[in-house]
């Protein structure tokens, strides 16, 4: 069984990132793997019993609410889950919340600190457009749209290197951040339907097996979606 916890699904879903949860569910069900999805909303203590924890992106006002709640009600359990090897995936605003802090105007908002990153606002345009990045395991494609510039700590590993697009800050050549099974990225649109291989990697990690041991699926549509997004990113 794969047990997934969606943090603040009613608030942090501005870029249709609920599609990531649907992708996880379908690729489990198609393989005969039991799948259980549980929400964790505001003022609800988080249970350290899931295999995957997911948080998407939201409006600034909603993200403030979630940030305060995350620190007060959920941080210890989320840190404990990450320490035992559970997957934690943050997309866009969720990525920022997994860091130490982010800024909205003059406001400094604390994050949960699972990743050694901090997000600031600088002069300049929003970082918008199709993006492709390379990881050791493969290529990720999608769409980015963020005003924040995310800076990696000196020992923080990026999720990947930018092939095309802006990435964390528009100039470093890095995108996202990664610590063991904790992943943060600005790639949405949503992320997993355009990158079936990453979805399977997450499922395999949740089950404690290698991705190549999962039952093979007919991925003609998924491969076409990935190729289309890669083309849109100019690769």
Image (tube, helix red, strand yellow):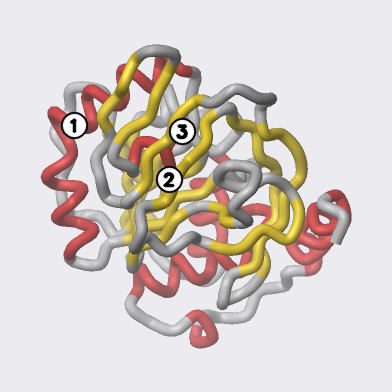
Q: Which residue is mark 2?
A: 90
Residue at mark 3: 93
Residue 3 vs 7, above or below: the answer is below
Graded by Cα atoms within 10 Å as few (under 14), some (14 to 19) or many (20 or more), the crowding at tag 3 reads many
Near-viewer residue (52 or 98)? 98
Read off the residue under disc 1.
Answer: 71
Q: Are marks 3 and 1 in contact (CB under 8 Å)?
A: no
Residue found 48% across the figure and 60% down from its top: 158
Q: Callout 1: helix, strand or loop?
A: helix
The percent coordinates of residue 94 (x first, y second) are 42, 38
234 relative position to 73: left or right: right
Foreground residue among 191 and 3? 191
Q: Position of residue 196 (x, y in %)?
A: 63, 63
Which residue: 51% across, 52% down?
Answer: 176
Calculate the distance from the C-alpha at mark 3 to the C-alpha at mark 1: 15 Å
Disc 2 to disc 1, how far (Cα)? 15 Å
Give residue 16's quadrant in the image: top right
Element carrying mark 3: helix
Does residue 171 lie above or below 199 as drawn? above
Q: Residue at x 32, y 45 (%)?
A: 5
Asked whether residue 29 appears in the rendered view, the answer is no
Residue at the spot 62% in from the left edge and 80% down from the top edge: 216
How many C-alpha atoms fall within 10 Å of the one at disc 2: few (<14), some, or many (≥20)? many
Q: Position of residue 115 (x, y in %)?
A: 32, 51
User: Which circle's residue, 3 or 1, is located before the other in the chain?
Assistant: 1
């Amino acid at each position: 069984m794969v047990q997934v916890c969606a943090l603040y699904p009613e608030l942090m879903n501005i870029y249709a990132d609920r599609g990531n949860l649907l992708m996880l569910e379908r690729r489990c069900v198609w393989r005969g793997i039991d799948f259980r999805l549980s929400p964790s909303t505001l003022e609800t203590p988080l249970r350290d019993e899931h295999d995957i924890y997911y948080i998407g992106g939201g409006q600034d006002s909603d993200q403030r609410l979630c940030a305060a709640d995350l620190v007060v009600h959920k941080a210890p359990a989320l840190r404990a889950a990450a320490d035992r090897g559970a997957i934690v995936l943050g997309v866009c605003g969720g990525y920022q919340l997994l860091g130490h802090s982010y800024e909205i105007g003059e406001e400094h908002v604390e994050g949960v600190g699972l990743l050694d990153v901090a997000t600031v606002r600088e002069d300049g345009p929003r970082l918008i457009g199709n993006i492709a990045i390379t990881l050791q395991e493969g290529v990720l494609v999608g769409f980015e749209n963020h005003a924040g510039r995310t800076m990696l700590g000196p020992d923080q590993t990026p999720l990947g290197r930018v092939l095309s697009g802006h990435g964390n800050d528009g100039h470093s050549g890095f995108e996202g951040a990664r610590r063991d099974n904790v992943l943060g990225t600005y790639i949405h649109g949503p992320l997993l339907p355009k990158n079936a291989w990453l979805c399977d990697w997450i499922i395999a990690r949740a089950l404690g097996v290698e991705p190549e041991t999962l039952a093979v699926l007919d991925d003609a549509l998924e491969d076409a979606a990935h190729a289309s997004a890669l083309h849109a990113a100019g690769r």
